[in-house]
Image (cartoon, rainbow, N blue to C red):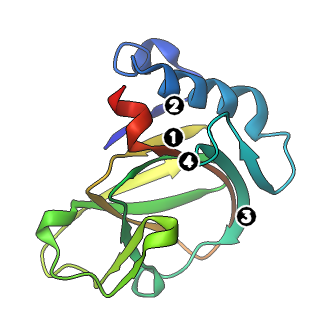
Amino acid sequence: MFCAYLNDPPAWQPLCSYPVLQRSLIWLEQHAATEALGDYPLDESDWYANVHTYQTLPEPDCLWESHAQTADVQYVIAGEEGIRWLPASKLNGALRTFTDRDRLEWAPPPEDTSLLTLRAGMFAIFLPGEAHCPMIALDAPKPIRKAVVKIPLRLLES
């Protein structure tokens, strides 16, 4: 997991040397705030950005998820949320698997986890095998506008 402010390229450019990651962050910087809700193909058929909105929730109502073949770049356009993080290897058996969307859903872990606070202008990268629990209300449920870029693992391996 990696987190930074999108408008602070010196903080993230040295760590984001993959062209697909650079292009994903550039798309977020140039388009995320102005695009309508929906999916935006970014070249390859399964490399895309999704702009969406939702209401954050009390933590017990939020779902843990991970991906085996996809990295998530989660960018908060407006609002804020908490995201819990833990290596998926620390979780016990997926509750549900959605192979068509490369998504596994998990029960909350029994151990303490890291809580990341994402505010407007911040992004976090979750790699395959990193479980995360987004949508957490920090004080009270509030609306959030967010973009998530889905990067197939094969594009990070080349």
- Residue 5's mark? 2
Q: Secondary structure at mark 2?
A: strand
Image quadrant assignment for residue 38: bottom right
Work out how far the residue at label 2 is from the one at label 3, CA to CA, in angstroms: 20 Å
Q: Position of residue 111 (x, y in %)?
A: 12, 75
Work out how far the residue at label 1 is from the one at label 4, CA to CA, in angstroms: 8 Å
Can you see residue 77? no
**Which residue is drawn at the image coordinates 85% and 39% (left, top)?**
34
Q: Which residue is mark 1?
A: 123
**Dot in front, 1 or 4:** 1
Tags 2 and 4 in contact by the CB under 8 Å rule?
A: no
Tags 4 and 3 in contact by the CB under 8 Å rule?
A: no
Q: Which residue is mark 4?
A: 119
Indicate the amino acid at tag 1.
Answer: Phe
Indicate the amino acid at tag 2.
Answer: Tyr
Work out how far the residue at label 2 is from the one at label 1, CA to CA, in angstroms: 6 Å
Dot 1 or dot 3, earlier in sequence:
3
Q: Position of residue 14 (x, y in %)?
A: 36, 13
Q: Which residue is mark 3?
A: 53
**Which residue is drawn at the image coordinates 64% and 45% (left, top)?**
45
Q: In the displayed structure, would residue 133 be above or below residue 23?
A: below
Crowding around mark 2 (Cα neighbors within 10 Å: few <14, some 14 to 19, many 20+) is some
Task: Name the side, left or right, on which 99 lies relative to 57.
Answer: left
Work out how far the residue at label 4 is from the one at label 3, CA to CA, in angstroms: 14 Å
Front in this rendered view, residue 147 or 139: 147
Can you see residue 58? yes
Crowding around mark 1 (Cα neighbors within 10 Å: few <14, some 14 to 19, many 20+) is many
Indicate the amino acid at tag 3.
Answer: Thr
Quadrant where the image shows the N terminus:
top left
Front in this rendered view, residue 93 or 126: 93
Tags 2 and 1 in contact by the CB under 8 Å rule?
A: yes
Q: In the displayed structure, would residue 16 be above or below residue 62?
A: above
